C-alpha cells in the first residue's frame, strides 16, 4: 500500500505548491469564461409568434465568470438545475451560447471555425455522467476509443489499434477486453472506457461531467484514484462537475459554487470548505450527512423550500428566498430568525400565492368572520416567536398586513410589508468581485458598481420609504404568482 | 438456512418489534436462479431506526420488498420467518394457526395472502426512491392520499373483511367509472384527512397542493407527499427504500429532518435502506451491512462504524471521501459486486474474491459470528487475526465464474494502471 501512495504524494505536493502561490497567480488561465449566458425560450414557436405570445426565457446559465488554470482541477458544484452541466456543454461549444465569451489558451472559442475548431476539439475533451448511454452499444471498447483518432486522422490503422489497446490498459482494463461491447462491462468499467476515449487525442483539458455519480462508492473510489493518477501523469487540466461535495473536496484544487444559473462563490478548495463566504455554500456544506458516528447529534438546519423556478427567478440575489441570512433594512431591529420569517411570508404572498382559504379553515372559521382568529393563526403558523420578537412599529405593521390579508387584499398586504421590510438582497443583484475567493453576497465585499447601486437604493428607500429600484422590482413579481 | 450455519447467538431484546430470521428471496429468471436475499437475519426494535446499507445489487431493496411481501414474479420468498410483535394479531391467530404464533410474535410469512395484505398500512408501510413513478400521474396527489386514508378507514370499520376495503375497485365499478368519470371513491372526510397529512409533512398551502397533479410537484415535495401517504395507516414499521437518493443535498436534509421528527412524534420504527453511509450515520440506531444477498455485519451504529470487523465494511468506509478531513488517497475495494446468479456463486464467502484478507478458511461459507453485545459479522476474522501463511494466492479466483468483471480486473496485474484499481 505504501509504495502505491508515493506517486500520489508527489501529486499532492505539486497541488500544494500550486495552492500557495494562488494569491499571486502569474500564469495565464487555460480556459477563461466571461459573462457566459445560455437562455432557452418557451412559447417561441411560429404559432406563438403569430398569436403574439411573448417568449418566456429560461436562464439556464446567466452570466457566469471563471478561469481554469493549467494543471488544476476546478470543481463546479450545485444542485440539479443550477446550470452546471449546461455551462460545461456551452463552453465546449456543444451548445450555442446566448452571450458571453470563452477563451481557450488565449483564443476565442465561439469564433473558431475550420481547422482551429478541429484543433480545439482535439485539445479539449468531455467525459459524461451516464456510463450506459454515453457509449455506443454497437461499438466495441476498442472501436469506441479508436473513433476520435480516426476522426482526426491520427496515425495509421495499426498505430491507432495499438494506441487504443494501450489506453484501455492504462485505465485499468485488459487487452483481451478491447473486443467486448459496452453491455459486457460494469458501470465502473464503462466509465473507464469513456475516460480512455477522452484521453485518446492527448488533450490538455477534460470536462468531467459527474463522472462518478452513477457509481457505487467502492467503484467510485477506483475511478477517482484513476482520474488523479492520469492527471499527474499527463499533466491534465480538469473541469470537474459534481453535486457530491465530498468528492469535490477530495479531487479539486478550486471550487465554483453555482445557484440558479449563476456562480455565487469561487475559491481554493480548503477555503470554500473551511470558511465558506456565501450563505448558500454554507448551507450546502451543512446539509451533507457525514459518515461518522457523531452525525446523529449534529444539528442540521435545512434550507427552506425548493430552488425557485428559473422561469421566474427572484429579483436581486437569486438565493434570497431561501437565505437564512437575508439582510434586514437598517431601521428594522428584529432577530434574524424572525426577519427571515417575514421574508418567507412575503415570498409566499408575492411569489407563491398564499392560500388564504386554508388559513381561514385552519383558524376554524371558513366563513371568514373572526379576524382575530385569522391573525392568531398567521402569527402562530408563520412565525417561530412572534409575540417575543415583534413589538412597537413591527407589531403594528404586521397587524396592518394581517388585517389586509384577512380582508382578502393581498396586494395591499404585500405593499405594507414591502414598505417596511424590503431588503437590499431583493433590490440589488450582488456580483463576484475580483479576488481569489470572491462571493456574490451583500454581506461580503462587492464591486464598486454594486456598492453604488446599493447606496442609490438606500437613499431612494429612505426618501420614498419603500419601493425598489433596479431590474425585476418585487412589485412586478406580486401579480405573477400564477406560474 | 440456519442448519448450515453456526446458530446465531446475537442477543434478542424485549424491545424487538420485528425479527427477521433467515429470510430468503429468490428470482427465477431465464439466466438462472438469483439469490437476491440469501439467509438474512436482523431485528428491529420499537421506535428504532434500523439501517440496511449496501451497494447496488446487494439485495437491500429486495429485502425491503420482502418485508412487505411486495416481491413480484419471477421473484418469491422461499424461506425464513418475519416475526412481528403484535399482541392482538397473535391472539387472533393463536387458535387457528398456532405454528405461526410465538408468544406475542406472529410469523407474517405464514399468514394467508389476505391477512398479510391487511397488515399493509396499519402495520407496515413503505416509501420508495422515485416518488415520480410511485404516484399515478393522472390523479391528483390529494386523491391518491385520500384513497390510502379511505382504505384504512374502511379497514378499521370492518377489520375482518378484506372485501370491504377493496370495494369500489371491481370490474363493475371500473365500467361505471367509464360512464360516469366523476365518480368518487373517497368521501369528504378522507379528503380532509389527506390535507391534514400533507400539512403534517410540511407542504405549504396543502389544500391547494392537494388538487395538483404529481407533475406539478417538485421532487422534494412529492417525496413529502409519499411520506404522507405512507403515514395514512399510522404504521408500526415504515420501510424507506432510498428515500433521499434522487434528491439534492439541501432537500435531502429537509426530508431526513422530517423523517426524524415524524418518528419522534409517532414512535414508529423505521427500516432505512440506503447506499449512503452519511444518511445511515445521521438516521440509524442499528445497522446491517449487506453484500451479495447476505448481511455481512450488523450491530449498533457505533459497532459498525467505529469498530468494523468485516473487510467489506472496512472497505466501504474507506471508499468514502471525507468532507471534513480531505487529502488521503481513497482505498477502494477492487473488483465489482457479483451478479448473485446461483450457478455463478461458489459455496464460499462471497466477498473472498475481492477481500484483501482472503484466506483458505474463506472457501467455506462463514456463518454469522458474535463479536460482542449486538455486534455480529459473517467473517472468519472474528475468530482470529489474519494469517498471511494461509492467504490465498494472487489471482486465485481468476477465471472462476464468480464475478466475471472482478476476475478480469485482477488479470491486469501487470498493467501500469493497476494501482488505480486495486490499492490493497
Image (cartoon, coloured by chain):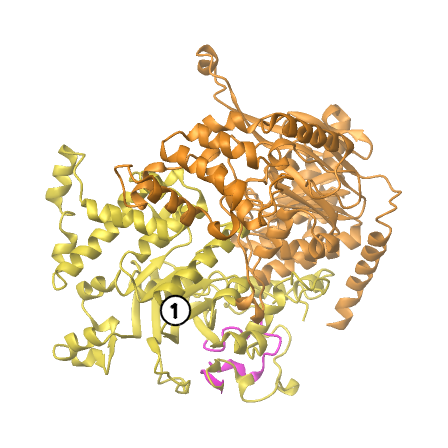
Chain colours: A orange, B yellow
Say which residue appears at 55% left-offset and 31% top-offset: A419
Residue B363 belongs to the span the image colors magenta: yes
**Of residues A442 and B139, which is closer to you in this image?**
A442
Depicted A35 relative to depicted A131: above or below: above
| Residue A137 on the magenta segment | no
Q: Position of residue A429 (x, y in %)?
A: 65, 33
Above-or-below relation of B192 to B235:
above
Compared to A416, does B223 lie above or below? below
The residue at the far top in this view is: A50
- Left or right: where A374 falls relative to A335: left
User: Which quadrant holds the N terminus of chain A?
Assistant: bottom right
* Residue A173, picture quadrant: bottom right
The picture places residue B143, in percent across and down from the top left corner, at 26, 43
- Name the foreground residue: A112 vs A99: A99
Question: Which of the pair A301/B74 is nearer the observer?
Answer: A301
Q: Position of residue A78 (x, y in %)?
A: 60, 45
- Quarter of the picture containing the C terminus of chain A is top left
Magenta part of the protein: which range? B347-371
Amino acid at each position: 500500500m505504501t509504495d502505491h501512495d508515493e506517486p500520489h504524494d508527489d501529486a499532492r505536493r505539486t497541488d500544494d505548491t500550486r495552492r500557495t502561490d494562488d494569491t499571486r497567480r502569474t500564469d495565464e488561465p487555460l480556459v477563461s469564461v466571461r459573462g457566459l449566458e445560455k437562455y432557452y425560450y418557451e412559447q417561441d414557436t411560429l404559432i406563438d409568434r403569430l398569436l403574439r405570445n411573448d417568449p418566456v426565457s429560461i436562464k439556464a446559465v446567466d452570466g457566469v465568470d471563471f478561469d481554469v488554470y493549467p494543471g488544476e482541477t476546478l470543481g463546479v458544484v450545485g444542485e440539479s438545475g443550477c446550470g452546471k452541466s449546461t455551462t460545461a456543454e456551452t463552453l465546449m461549444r456543444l451548445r450555442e451560447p446566448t452571450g458571453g465569451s470563452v477563451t481557450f489558451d488565449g483564443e476565442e472559442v465561439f469564433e473558431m471555425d475550420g481547422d482551429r475548431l478541429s484543433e480545439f476539439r482535439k485539445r479539449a475533451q468531455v467525459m459524461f455522467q451516464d456510463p450506459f448511454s454515453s457509449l455506443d452499444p454497437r461499438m466495441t471498447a476498442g472501436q469506441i476509443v479508436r473513433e476520435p483518432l480516426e476522426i482526426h486522422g491520427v496515425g495509421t490503422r495499426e498505430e491507432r489499434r495499438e494506441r487504443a489497446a494501450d489506453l484501455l490498459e492504462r485505465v485499468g482494463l485488459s487487452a483481451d477486453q478491447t473486443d467486448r461491447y459496452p453491455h459486457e462491462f460494469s458501470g465502473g468499467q464503462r466509465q473507464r472506457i469513456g475516460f480512455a476515449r477522452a484521453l485518446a487525442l492527448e488533450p490538455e483539458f477534460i470536462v468531467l461531467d459527474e463522472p462518478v455519480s452513477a457509481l457505487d462508492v467502492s467503484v467510485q473510489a477506483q475511478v477517482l484514484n484513476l482520474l488523479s493518477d492520469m492527471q499527474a501523469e499527463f499533466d491534465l487540466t480538469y473541469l470537474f462537475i459534481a453535486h457530491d461535495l465530498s468528492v469535490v473536496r477530495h479531487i479539486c484544487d478550486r471550487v465554483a459554487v453555482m445557484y440558479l444559473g449563476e456562480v455565487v462563490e469561487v475559491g481554493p478548495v480548503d477555503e470554500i470548505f473551511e470558511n465558506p463566504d456565501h450563505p448558500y455554500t454554507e448551507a450546502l456544506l451543512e446539509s451533507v450527512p457525514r459518515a461518522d458516528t457523531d452525525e446523529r447529534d449534529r444539528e442540521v438546519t435545512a434550507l427552506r423550500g425548493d430552488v425557485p423556478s428559473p422561469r421566474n427567478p427572484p429579483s436581486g440575489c437569486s438565493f434570497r428566498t431561501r437565505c437564512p441570512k437575508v439582510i434586514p433594512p437598517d431601521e428594522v431591529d428584529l432577530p434574524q430568525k424572525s426577519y427571515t420569517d417575514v421574508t418567507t411570508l412575503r415570498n409566499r404572498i408575492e411569489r407563491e400565492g398564499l392560500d388564504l382559504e386554508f388559513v381561514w379553515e385552519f383558524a376554524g372559521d371558513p366563513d371568514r368572520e373572526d379576524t382575530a382568529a385569522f391573525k392568531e393563526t398567521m402569527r402562530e403558523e408563520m412565525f417561530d416567536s412572534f409575540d417575543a420578537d415583534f413589538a412597537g412599529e413591527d407589531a403594528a405593521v404586521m397587524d396592518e398586513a394581517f388585517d389586509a390579508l384577512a380582508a382578502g387584499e393581498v396586494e395591499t398586504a404585500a405593499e405594507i410589508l414591502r414598505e417596511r421590510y424590503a431588503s437590499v438582497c431583493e433590490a440589488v443583484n450582488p456580483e463576484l468581485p475580483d479576488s481569489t475567493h470572491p462571493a456574490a453576497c451583500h454581506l461580503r465585499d462587492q464591486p464598486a458598481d454594486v456598492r453604488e447601486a446599493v447606496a442609490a437604493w438606500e437613499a431612494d428607500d429612505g426618501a420614498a420609504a419603500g419601493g425598489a429600484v433596479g431590474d425585476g422590482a418585487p412589485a412586478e413579481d406580486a401579480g405573477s404568482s400564477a406560474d | 438456512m440456519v442448519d448450515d450455519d453456526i446458530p446465531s447467538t446475537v442477543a434478542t431484546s424485549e424491545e424487538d418489534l420485528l425479527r427477521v430470521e433467515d429470510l430468503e428471496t429468490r428470482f427465477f429468471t431465464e439466466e438462472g436462479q438469483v439469490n437476491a436475499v440469501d439467509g438474512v437475519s436482523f431485528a428491529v426494535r420499537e421506535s428504532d431506526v434500523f439501517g440496511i446499507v449496501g451497494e447496488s445489487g446487494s439485495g437491500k431493496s429486495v429485502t425491503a420488498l420482502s418485508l412487505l411481501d411486495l416481491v413480484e414474479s419471477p421473484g418469491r420468498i422461499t424461506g425464513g420467518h418475519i416475526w412481528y410483535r403484535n399482541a392482538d394479531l397473535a391472539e387472533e391467530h393463536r387458535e387457528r394457526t398456532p405454528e405461526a404464533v410465538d408468544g406475542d410474535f406472529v410469523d407474517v410469512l405464514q399468514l394467508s395472502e389476505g391477512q398479510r395484505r391487511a397488515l399493509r398500512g396499519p402495520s407496515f408501510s413503505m416509501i420508495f426512491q422515485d416518488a415520480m413513478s410511485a404516484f399515478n400521474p393522472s390523479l391528483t396527489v390529494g386523491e391518491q392520499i385520500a384513497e390510502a386514508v379511505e382504505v384504512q378507514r374502511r379497514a378499521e370499520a370492518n377489520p375482518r373483511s378484506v372485501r370491504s376495503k377493496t370495494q369500489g375497485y371491481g370490474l363493475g365499478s371500473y365500467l361505471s367509472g367509464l360512464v360516469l368519470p366523476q365518480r368518487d371513491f373517497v368521501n369528504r372526510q378522507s379528503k380532509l384527512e389527506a390535507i391534514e397529512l400533507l400539512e403534517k409533512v410540511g407542504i405549504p398551502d396543502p389544500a391547494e397542493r392537494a388538487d395538483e397533479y404529481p407533475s406539478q410537484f417538485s421532487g422534494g415535495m412529492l417525496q413529502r407527499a409519499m411520506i404522507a401517504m405512507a403515514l395514512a395507516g399510522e404504521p408500526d414499521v415504515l420501510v424507506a427504500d432510498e428515500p433521499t437518493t434522487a434528491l439534492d443535498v439541501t432537500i435531502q436534509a429537509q426530508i431526513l429532518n422530517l423523517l426524524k421528527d415524524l418518528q419522534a412524534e409517532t414512535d414508529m420504527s423505521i427500516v432505512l435502506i440506503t447506499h449512503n453511509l452519511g444518511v445511515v450515520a445521521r438516521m440509524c440506531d442499528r445497522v446491517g451491512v449487506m453484500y451479495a444477498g447476505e448481511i455481512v455485519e450488523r450491530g449498533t451504529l457505533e459497532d459498525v462504524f467505529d469498530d468494523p470487523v468485516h473487510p467489506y465494511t472496512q472497505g466501504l468506509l474507506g471508499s468514502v471521501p471525507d468532507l471534513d478531513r480531505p487529502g488521503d488517497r481513497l482505498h477502494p475495494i477492487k473488483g465489482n459486486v457479483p451478479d448473485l446468479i446461483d450457478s455463478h456463486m461458489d459455496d464460499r464467502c462471497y466477498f473472498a474474491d475481492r477481500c484483501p484478507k482472503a484466506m483458505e478458511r474463506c472457501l467455506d461459507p462463514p456463518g454469522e459470528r458474535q463479536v460482542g453485545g449486538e455486534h455480529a459479522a459473517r467473517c472468519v476474522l472474528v475468530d482470529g487475526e489474519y494469517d498471511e501463511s494461509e492467504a490465498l494466492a494472487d489471482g486465485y479466483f481468476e477465471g472462476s465464474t464468480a464475478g466475471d468483471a472482478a476476475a478480469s480486473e485482477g488479470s491486469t496485474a501487470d498493467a501500469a494502471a493497476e494501482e488505480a484499481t486495486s490499492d490493497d
